[in-house]
Amino acid sequence: RKEVEQDPGPFNVPEGATVAFNCTYSNSASQSFFWYRQDCRKEPKLLMSVYSSGNEDGRFTAQLNRASQYISLLIRDSKLSDSATYLCVFLDSNYQLIWGAGTKLIIKP
Amino acid sequence: GAGVSQSPSNKVTEKGKDVELRCDPISGHTALYWYRQSLGQGLEFLIYFQGNSAPDKSGLPSDRFSAERTGGSVSTLTIQRTQQEDSAVYLCASSLWGQGGEKLFFGSGTQLSVL
């Protein structure tokens, strides 16, 4: 099993819809989790950290399910500008960041 | 307020040549990371520098790859005798303390093409 797995997509979603995707990880000792956003041919940028209790930032909600070993990202009222690849990242027990290959999201007008 | 700067932005080279990629991290950031990203793939860790500590070289794919960080600031990634499979985007990132749980700031990358 890969250390981290994401559905590569693409997720084609109409503007204004709600979309959610998950990221599973295999290392139960993982300590910290993040979602980064990467636009086409651009560098990744931190979208949000994922806290144990779940956290929300505007239209974005991140959740952690330790029992099932996955994190999720939910985007409400999606905008055209949300089109990007979303990378999940976790910090393993050796304090190394492990990156998923990303989920591609396309918001259509 | 300059961010992480990488140069060159694009590099085309012939198989067997050596290349040097440069990274200027954000001033004051003690941690510096090099990653490689192939098209449609996630980030592959290469090497990590933190302050004056010995670098974590565990991600370097072969002995053709090396990196140094001079004066705790600028870093150079060197690839000797390049191969076609080295073609990728090489991303540099820096963070304030390198404690793993903090935000990474990425440069815009160097697109390396080995012909």
Image (cartoon, rainbow, N blue to C red):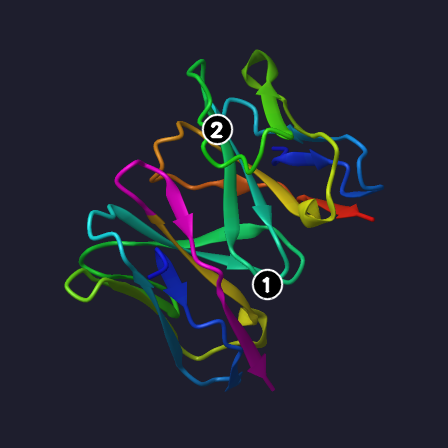
Does residue B11 appear left or right of residue A104 in this picture? right
The quarter of the image holding the N terminus of chain A is bottom left
Q: What's the magenta region?
A: A91-109
The quarter holding residue B80 reads top right
Residue A30 lies, in percent from the top left, at 25, 48
The location of residue A73, given as percent across then percent down, is: 36, 68
Which amino acid lies under the numbered mark 2 shown in the image of this protein?
Answer: Lys
Q: In this view, does B41 lie above or below A18?
A: above
Nearer-the-camera pick, B99 or A2: A2
Q: Position of residue B60 (x, y in %)?
A: 53, 34
The answer to whether residue A88 is left or right of residue A26 is right
Would you call the spot at circle 2 few (<14 residues within 10 Å), some (14-19), or many (20 or more)? some
Q: Quadrant of the C terminus of chain A?
A: bottom right
Q: Name the residue under label 1.
A: B40
Q: Quadrant of residue B102?
A: top left
* Residue in front for this viewpoint, B19 or A32: B19
Q: Which residue is drawn at 66% across and 48% down?
A: B89
Which sits in the foreground, B55 or B14?
B14
- What chain is tagged by disc 1? B
Above or below for A18 versus B106: below
Q: Is mark 2 on a helix, strand or loop?
A: loop
Chain-order first, disc 2 or disc 1: 1
Q: Name the residue under label 2.
A: B57
Q: Which chain carries label 2?
A: B
